[in-house]
Image (spheres, rainbow, N blue to C red):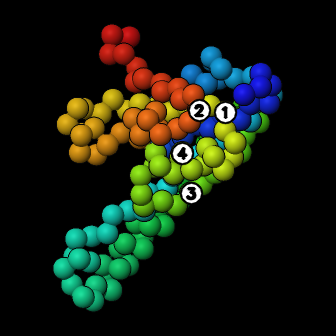
Amino acid sequence: MSSSNRTILLAVDQSKASLRAFNWYVENLHKSEDTLILAHIHQMPDLPNKFMLTEIPSVGLLENYKIKTISSYEKSKELLTSYENLCKEHQIISKVIFVENQDSPGHKICELVKENEVDIIITGKRGLSKFDRIFLGSTSDYIIHHAQIPVIVVPPESKNH
């Protein structure tokens, strides 16, 4: 990694942890030559269990899923627009990557790192309980163990502050 023209990937989602990671980048790491990739891994809404139980889903069930999917895309577009606006406010060169993914977000982030020649990854940590990390997995844990570049995980705000 050279000292100038760094490419930094910030994994963004709807969480406070993501915004905290962005703010940490601005306050602690940002250089005017950086390119900040705002990567959003869109997870499709879960299919209703009734899809699994019937051979032919009802029209109402399909319509409801369609509405959820459209709403999910709209929220993702709004999220990315808000981060693009933050980048403009802070005069940060940015690039948006919106990816559809049903697998592990961490795995997809590691793929994007290779495809975009990223120098550093920044992600927020939500503060999942030990139980949740065991059963749901942790995106930041996955990235730490599989990325071949430096990873900065911004912890949740301390409850003492």
Give the spatial CA distance, label 1 vs label 3. Answer: 20 Å
- At label 2, the amino acid type is Ile
Rendered image: mark on residue 149: 2
- At label 1, the amino acid type is Asp
| Tag 2 and tag 1, C-beta contact below 8 Å | yes
Q: Which residue is mark 3?
A: 99
- At label 3, the amino acid type is Val
Circle 1: is it few (<14), some (14-19), or many (20+) Cα within 10 Å? some
- Which image quarter: residue 65? bottom left
The residue drawn where x is 62% and y is 38% is 9
Q: Which residue is mark 4?
A: 110
Q: State the SS at label 1.
A: loop
The residue drawn where x is 53% and y is 26% is 152
The residue drawn where x is 19% and y is 79% is 53
Comparing labels 1 and 3, the label whose residue is closer to the camera = 1
Give the spatial CA distance, label 2 vs label 1. Answer: 6 Å
Sequence-earlier tag: 2 or 3: 3
- Which image quarter: residue 142? top left
| Tag 4 and tag 3, C-beta contact below 8 Å | no
Give the spatial CA distance, label 4 vs label 3. Answer: 13 Å
Sequence-earlier tag: 4 or 1: 4
Q: Is residue 40 visible?
A: no
Give the spatial CA distance, label 2 vs label 3. Answer: 21 Å
Sequence-earlier tag: 4 or 2: 4
Q: Which residue is mark 1?
A: 119
- Furthest toward the top, the residue is 160
Q: Is residue 132 left or right of residue 117?
A: left
